Image: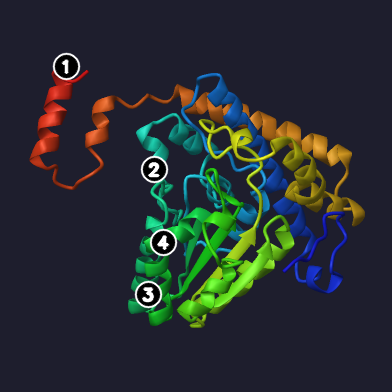
């Protein structure tokens, strides 16, 4: 499914389902999170943050999906889905704190139904299905929205989550950002199936394959799936074919497993979601260089202010890591905590 072509030309019939205001808002947020992503890489390289997982290239997939969710819906993100969480309202300084290794970086404001970023691959899909089942049992019209990458589809948790959701016809959307690589493993080495969306039929649910670099296509696909789930139509598997432009994390060297220079040229020309949406807005007279400069300056100030607020907050102490694992701490952790408190651990 594609609505907007790389040159900004669009299917006007489908485009008419999205207002000009929605298009502008999506573009502004996509540009905002891209600037944030680049800021985080710079901070990591300066030694001010820990290892960071860049998402440049996946802005359309994350932003356009997140804006479709209602406040009551539940979001289950991975460690690369901060653009989606920020679109939903997660404070920028909280994301900074997360990558600084601070305990409050996991804290989500009570009014936001966002789970903390999930680092183990695919385990949160089961959590999303559990929340959807709870909603069904409580007769609530909330939807679970689960983000994951192509590598997660090789995990047993993926099968278990989709199988359970299909059997019980649950209100959940599985949103796979297929960026082509599970760290360094290309998709062709992960699955004999030509697409991820094709797997949906095995679980008795609809599968949609969408151009993940086309914000409008992602928006319409997610709207359809969420509406269906909310109204008793059951789960959907969406495959958003996108591109992780940079490294898997700042500890990764993508030049060891792909031609980064060639990909850079192709990506900038054909796959840059931000550029594509800007071309569309410019052609419709909804955006220009002046508005671009003003928005970049505004976001730049936000980036600086959020960082200054993040570093001004008290830093976590190592001993705090024991406090948020179990409701009742087991004996072996009690012992380790005492050792650390008394300087008995290096």
- Asked whether disc 1 touches disc 4, contact meaning CB atoms under 8 Å apart, the reply is no
Residue 105 left/right relative to 148: left
Q: Return the residue at label 4.
A: 125
Which numbered disc, 3 or 1, marks the residue closer to the eye?
A: 3
- Label 3's element? helix
Q: Which label belongs to residue 343?
A: 1
Q: Residue 298: x and y, percent?
A: 71, 34
Whichever of labels 2 and 1 marks the residue nearer the N terminus, that label is 2
Residue 251 left/right relative to 60: left
Q: Return the residue at label 2.
A: 107
Whichever of labels 1 and 4 marks the residue nearer the N terminus, that label is 4
Q: Residue 275: x and y, percent?
A: 80, 46
Whichever of labels 3 and 2 marks the residue nearer the N terminus, that label is 2
Mark 2 neighbour class, 10 Å CA radius: few under 14, some 14 to 19, many 20 or more: some
Residue 75 in view of the camera: no
- Asked whether disc 2 touches disc 4, contact meaning CB atoms under 8 Å apart, the reply is no
Which numbered disc, 2 or 4, marks the residue closer to the eye?
A: 4
Q: Return the residue at label 3.
A: 164
């Amino acid at each position: 499914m594609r609505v907007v072509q790389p040159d900004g030309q669009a299917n006007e019939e489908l485009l008419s389902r999205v207002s000009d205001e929605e298009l502008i808002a999506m573009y502004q947020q996509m540009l905002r999170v891209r600037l944030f992503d680049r800021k985080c890489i710079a901070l990591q390289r300066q030694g001010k943050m820990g290892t960071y997982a860049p998402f440049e290239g996946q802005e359309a997939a994350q932003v356009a999906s997140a804006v479709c969710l209602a406040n009551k819906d539940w979001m289950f993100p991975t460690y690369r889905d901060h653009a989606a969480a920020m679109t939903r309202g997660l404070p920028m300084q909280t994301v900074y704190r997360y990558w600084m290794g601070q305990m409050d970086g996991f804290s989500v404001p009570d009014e936001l139904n966002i789970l903390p970023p999930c680092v183990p691959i695919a385990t949160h899909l089961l959590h999303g299905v559990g929340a959807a089942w709870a909603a069904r049992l409580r007769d609530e019209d909330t939807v679970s929205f689960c983000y994951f990458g192509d590598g997660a589809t090789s995990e047993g948790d993926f099968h278990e989550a989709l199988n359970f959701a299909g059997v019980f016809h649950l209100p959940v959307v599985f949103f796979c950002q297929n960026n082509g690589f599970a760290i360094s493993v290309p998709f062709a080495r992960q699955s004999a199936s030509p697409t991820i969306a094709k797997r949906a039929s095995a679980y008795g649910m609809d599968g949609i394959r969408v151009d993940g670099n086309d914000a409008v296509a992602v928006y319409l696909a997610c709207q359809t799936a969420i509406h269906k789930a909310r109204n008793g139509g059951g789960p959907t598997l969406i495959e958003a074919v996108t591109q992780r432009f940079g490294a898997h994390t700042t500890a990764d060297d993508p030049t060891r497993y792909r031609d980064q220079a060639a990909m850079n040229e192709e990506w900038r020309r054909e796959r840059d979601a931000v550029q594509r949406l800007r071309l569309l807005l410019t052609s419709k007279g909804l955006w220009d260089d002046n508005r671009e400069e003003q928005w970049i300056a505004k976001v730049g100030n936000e980036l600086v202010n959020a960082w200054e607020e993040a570093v001004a907050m008290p830093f976590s102490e190592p001993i705090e890591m024991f406090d948020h694992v179990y409701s009742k701490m087991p004996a072996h952790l009690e012992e380790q905590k005492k050792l650390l408190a008394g300087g008995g651990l290096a």
